[in-house]
Amino acid sequence: MKSTLLVVVLFCASAHPQQTNQATAVFIFPSTLPFSIHAPIFVDGVEVASLKPNNYLKMKIPAGEHTFASKRKEEGADRILEAGKIYYFRIRTPLILEPVSAEVGVYDEKYLPEQTDRR
């Protein structure tokens, strides 16, 4: 009896895949500075990560309107994110975060290592 119930529960769970309301934001920091400076990443005024130079970082962010910034959380780029889509942001000197096209983002992502921690 228990095994039958388990099969039914597993079937129901796999028959209806979970809908996600998340977008992916990729932050890229291609630095040419001769010293190591980390770039803070702000989402909606809250610091969520510190990106190392010459790395990129992927984050899941709820779909909707958000403000993205580096250095000064008050000065940022407002974007409306759609679920399931990927958005690229590049940090340039002096720590200014700007949205970039998918072509530019994918190129940078290909040649820079991914930072897996947020600090």
Image (tube, rainbow, N blue to C red):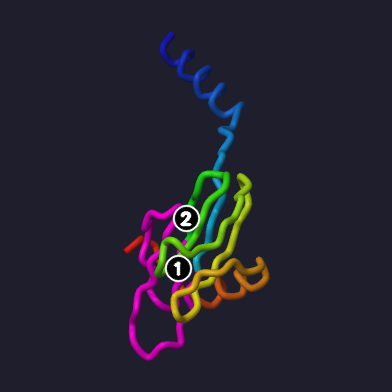
* Magenta run includes residue 41: yes
View extreme (front): residue: 74
Residue indicated by mark 2: 59
Please tell me which residue is depicted at 38% across the width and 67% down the height of the picture: 40
Q: Nearer the viewer, mark 1 or mark 2?
A: 2
Instruction: Choose the circle earlier in sequence order: 1 or 2.
Output: 2
Q: How would you rate the neighbour count of disc 1 (Cα within 10 Å): few for under 14, some for 14-19, many for 20 or more?
A: some
Q: Residue 29: where, in percent of width, then height?
A: 47, 74
Q: Is residue 35 above or below residue 113?
A: below
Mark 2: amino acid: Met
Q: Specify the label residue 4 is tagged with.
A: none
Start-end of magenta stretch? 28-57
Please tell me which residue is depicted at 60% across the width and 56% down the height of the picture: 86
* Residue 19 vs residue 4, the one in the foreground: 19
Residue indicated by mark 1: 114
Q: Is residue 4 above or below residue 111?
A: above
Q: Residue 23: where, in percent of width, then height?
A: 56, 49
Quadrant that contains the N terminus: top left
Secondary structure type for disc 2: strand
Q: Is residue 21 above or below residue 6?
A: below
Please tell me which residue is depicted at 34% across the width and 79% down the height of the picture: 37
